Amino acid sequence: MKFIHEEFLLQTKTARRLYHKFAEPEPIFDYHCHLPPKDLAENRQFKNLFEIWLEGDHYKWRAMRSNGVPERYCTGDAEPFEKFKAWAATVPDTIRNPLYHWTHLELKRYFGVDELLNEANASRIWKQANALLATPQFTALGICRKFKVTHVCTTDDPADDLKYHHALAASGGFTQVLPAFRPDKSLGVNQPKQFQPWLEALACAADVDIKDLNSFLQALKARHEFFHQNGCRLSDHGLNQCFAEFPTEKEAARIFVKARTGRPVSGEEHCRFASFMMLFFGHLDASKGWVKQLHLGALRNNNTRLLRQLGPDTGFDSIGDFSQAVSLSNYLNRLDQDNALPKTIIYNLNPADNYMFAAMLGNFQDGTIAGKIQLGSGWWFLDQKEGMEWQMNALSNLGLLSRFVGMVTDSRSFMSYPRHEYFRRTLCNLIGNDVENGLIPNDEKMVGPMIKNICYQNARHYLNFPTLAELGGKTSQTARQRLK
């Protein structure tokens, strides 16, 4: 039997039936990713398998380094085929790492490759994939259409001009590409080398002279409104843990002026200023009806030598063991007290905290919106079969799995869309096993719609994005059929 076959990961008859009938047909709502909007707007045609598969994939780089592969074949100056060959030689040693599953699922779904990748067949697979990549079906937008991706939310800085999103909205294609507001740099008063140039970029984008806290908040509010006008309905924050040491506005203003004038800001001052800003962003999101995303728990840039040499996002981040419960509770509680708690998706990176996060959700469900506070899908180091099962088990035991808004790619690669299939197979296997063990009724009319909702419909209704027509863009016949 081929490794990637019709019943891959589906261990029971019920799991297979649920997957093929209810999960497999659903389109994809990719509400959080790191795809470059430029690639989508220009409908990038990838020259070879390296460009689409290895160019920025720190998951693969980590595995290659662990396998003794020199850095020049990861992020260095080796030729594209040599880098691919080094990856192919590593693949057999990734057994039981999710990369082994992802690699072969992606090769199968994109290029029809049923072979197990290794150094011996690397050249043949390279040529086969490259021939297909030269066809219209494998442009950036062609791939989105191939995998029935109706919505893509990129991750964008408040200073971004969103020109690529404008171009995409005007084109009115099958996939609606919308921005997400990621204001992490606004918290960086303790990093003057990065903070000062970013302030200048923000001032220019907002056409505001940023000289004090009030003008800073004015600029951010203007950019928030600009993003809203361009279809944004999501914010996102990547934090070690929530900031919840709330200062007065006067104290926050003093800290901002220190940073703006180049004076050093202490760790305590940074924490208090960031807490002030996170409340500000919570109020903004609530006022616009946005969804707030909190990505919590990553310990980033652990290897400072290689950070200096290679830069961030090159594979030197890991799971942190931060204390999360009190700060998360205080942050959500303060917004709730202010009647300004938006719909919120909380992503946890440390599996030891799954039950704490899942329990925390119930404290702030207020009966106004089903699933208002969400436990986000297994993220980063947890977006594999076991991690996704842990997340769904915690949510099932302490909340409502039926209201779960499902999977995201959280990826920089156009090769990642089979991650949704991987999640759906894992979901159906989990539910199917429970049905056959008598833990869930064998009732398709009840279980089937729940599967469909988790795979697509819950996200669609929860996020409630504007249509292209509502944004004033061109709406093609294909786009109008997207959600029918």
Image: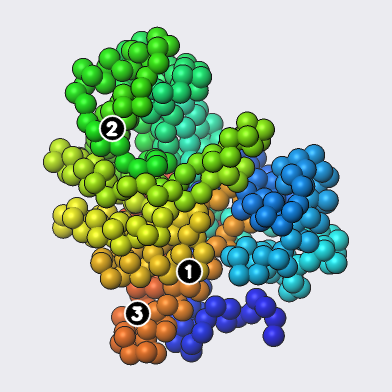
Q: Residues within 10 Å of mark 2 (few under 14, many from 20)?
A: many
| Residue drawn at (64%, 79%) of the image | 5
**Residue type at tag 3:** Val
| Residue drawn at (35%, 13%) of the image | 258
Q: Disc 2 or 1, which lies upstream in sequence? A: 2
Callout 2–callout 1 Cβ contact below 8 Å = no
Distance CA(mark 2)–CA(mark 1): 34 Å
Q: Residues within 10 Å of mark 3 (few under 14, many from 20)?
A: some
Q: Disc 1 or 3, which lies upstream in sequence? A: 1
Distance CA(mark 3)–CA(mark 2): 42 Å
| Residue drawn at (37%, 68%) of the image | 392
From the viewer's side, name the closer residue of 112 and 139: 112
**Residue type at tag 2:** Ser
Residue 115 position within the rendered picture, expressed as x and y whole percent measured from the top left? 76, 73
Distance CA(mark 1)–CA(mark 3): 22 Å
Q: Secondary structure at mark 2?
A: helix
| Residue drawn at (69%, 46%) of the image | 55
**Residue type at tag 1:** Glu
Which residue is label 2 attached to? 275
If the image is split into quadrants, where does the C terminus sit? bottom left
Left of 452 or right of it: where is 64? Answer: right
- Mark closer to the observer (1, 3): 1
Q: Disc 3 or 2, which lies upstream in sequence? A: 2
Which residue is label 1 attached to? 386
Q: Secondary structure at mark 1?
A: helix
Q: What numbered label is drawn on residue 447?
A: 3
